[in-house]
């Protein structure tokens, strides 16, 4: 019968054990970590709400504009009705720009959060 041997390595340092790091509070779900995480989530949710409001206001008001100004329905651009040009062509660059801005701000919020809890997420490109 063979004897059991316990193999161990050098002690590992965890992010929570690092001095000055608040990431352990988040991982261990302490009340302080909960505050940090709720702060990030509320900021991200607020940003998403603002983007949705921008889309709703710009795209939602176009039908209202055509209803209030029926003469716009008779305008043609390159042989197509103005409404089709606005909703079928012009809206796409706007949505791409809005999505690009949203991603940049979400990443900025995450960088701020990482800086707050004391983690190093790599290089921080300036935007």
Image: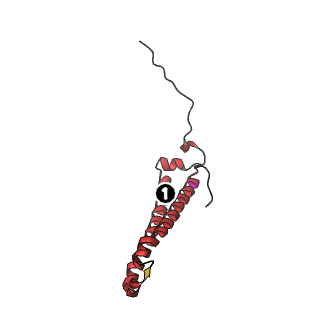
As for residue 124 lying within the magenta part, the answer is: yes
Number of marks in picture: 1
In the rendered view, tell whether residue 38 sits above or below residue 56.
Answer: above
Q: Residue furthest top?
A: 1
Depicted 102 relative to depicted 57: above or below = above
Disc 1 target residue: 35
In the rendered image, the vertical position of residue 18 relative to residue 2, given as above or below: below
- Residue 2 sits inside the magenta stretch: no
Q: Residue at x 54, y 61 (%)?
A: 104
**Of the pair 2 and 97, the residue shown nearer to us:** 97
**Residue 113 horizontal side relative to residue 90, left or right:** right
Residue drawn 58% across the image and 51% down it: 118
**Side of 55 where 113 appears, left or right:** right
> Furthest residue to the front?
79
Looking at the rendering, the stretch of residues picked out in magenta corresponds to 115-127
Quadrant containing the C terminus in the rendered view: bottom right
Can residue 56 be seen here? The reply is no
- Tell me the quarter of the picture where residue 108 sits: bottom right
Q: Position of residue 45 (x, y in %)?
A: 45, 63
Instruction: Please name the predominant secondary structure of the magenta segment in the image.
Output: loop
Q: Nearer the viewer, residue 38 or 74?
A: 74
Image quadrant in which the N terminus is located: top left
């Amino acid at each position: 019968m063979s004897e059991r041997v316990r193999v161990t390595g050098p002690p590992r340092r965890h992010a929570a054990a690092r001095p000055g790091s608040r990431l352990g509070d988040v991982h261990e779900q302490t009340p302080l970590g909960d505050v940090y995480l709720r702060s990030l989530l509320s900021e991200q949710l607020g940003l998403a709400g603002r983007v949705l409001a921008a889309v709703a206001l710009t795209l939602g008001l176009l039908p209202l504009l055509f209803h209030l100004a029926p003469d716009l329905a008779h305008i043609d651009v390159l042989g197509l009705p103005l409404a089709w040009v606005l909703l079928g062509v012009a809206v796409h660059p706007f949505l791409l720009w809005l999505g690009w801005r949203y991603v940049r701000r979400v990443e900025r919020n995450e960088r701020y959060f990482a800086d707050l809890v004391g983690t190093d997420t790599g290089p921080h490109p300036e935007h």
